[in-house]
Image: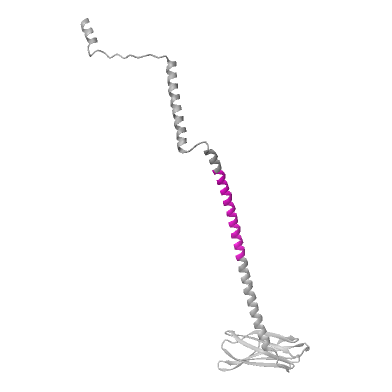
Amino acid sequence: MRWKLLRRRLSISAPRMIVRSRLPWPLRWAAVALMFGFSAALGLWAFEFGKDIAGFDGDSKAELAKLRVEVEQLRDEREKALSVANIAESLLKTEKAAQDKLAQSVKAVEAENMTLKSDLGFFERLLPASGSEGLTIRGLQAEEKSPGQLRFQLLVMQAGKAPPEFAGRYEVTLTGLLDGKPWSLPQPGGPKPLQLKQYLRVEGMIDHPVGAVVKAVTVRVLGKNGEARANQTLKL
């Protein structure tokens, strides 16, 4: 029996033996701390080396601050440029409105000048011939404005440098054809009052039957007592 046990211990099938060295726990903690310290130092060195490679040196903070200042300056310049652009746009709008208003004023003045020229030509045509005396009717004009409506205008004048004031009446009569027969129409409402010193422009509208064909317009100026002072007939 002993021989068998001794043989088993000395043979290949004998149990494996492990030799362990038992260190005290303070030494173990010191070794762990030393290992962590070495790893931290290695990581810090790698970090600093990486910063040097990437160009993040000590001057990067100053350069970053400089870039921030430049950004603020660019922002200020942009705000100033926008303000100037807004002011310029407002000035352009104001100038355009002023130009439009001026153009309208010019058109109004041109229209007024055309009216004045027309009136001047009208009065020049109506000036009495030299040597004429008393009350006269000049420049009788008439035209159909619309079916059944006729517009007339004339100038009543007194010759002389200081003629007395005239107070009387005038009447307008239309003559022509209606349904193929002779037709006439006195001015509705009868003779109209007329008062002037040297000249007076008279104009008005007369309504007549739509089917009437106006052939002539006659104007008479009457004195206070109904006597005829002047008359004129215009054939259409």
Quadrant for residue 23, please give it.
Answer: top left
- Residue at the top extreme of this rendering: 2
Report the side of 128 relative to 42 (left or right).
right
Report the side of 53 relative to 72 (left or right).
left
Q: Position of residue 108 (x, y in %)?
A: 63, 74
Out of 13 and 175, give the one closest to the viewer. 13
Q: Is residue 71 magenta?
A: yes
Camera sees residue 83:
yes
Q: What colour-coding does the image apply?
A: one colour
Examine the rendered structure and indicate whether residue 66 appears above or below residue 14: below
The quarter of the picture where the C terminus appears is bottom right
Out of 87 and 169, give the one closest to the viewer. 87
Q: Position of residue 228 (x, y in %)?
A: 72, 93
Camera sees residue 189:
no
First to last magenta residue range: 67-96
User: How would you classify the magenta stretch by its main secondary structure?
Assistant: helix
Report the side of 23 relative to 70 (left or right).
left
Q: Position of residue 91 (x, y in %)?
A: 61, 61
Quadrant for residue 137, please give it.
Answer: bottom right
The residue depicted at 23 percent of the width and 7 percent of the height is 6
Quadrant for residue 135, please give it.
Answer: bottom right
The residue depicted at 63 percent of the width and 77 percent of the height is 111
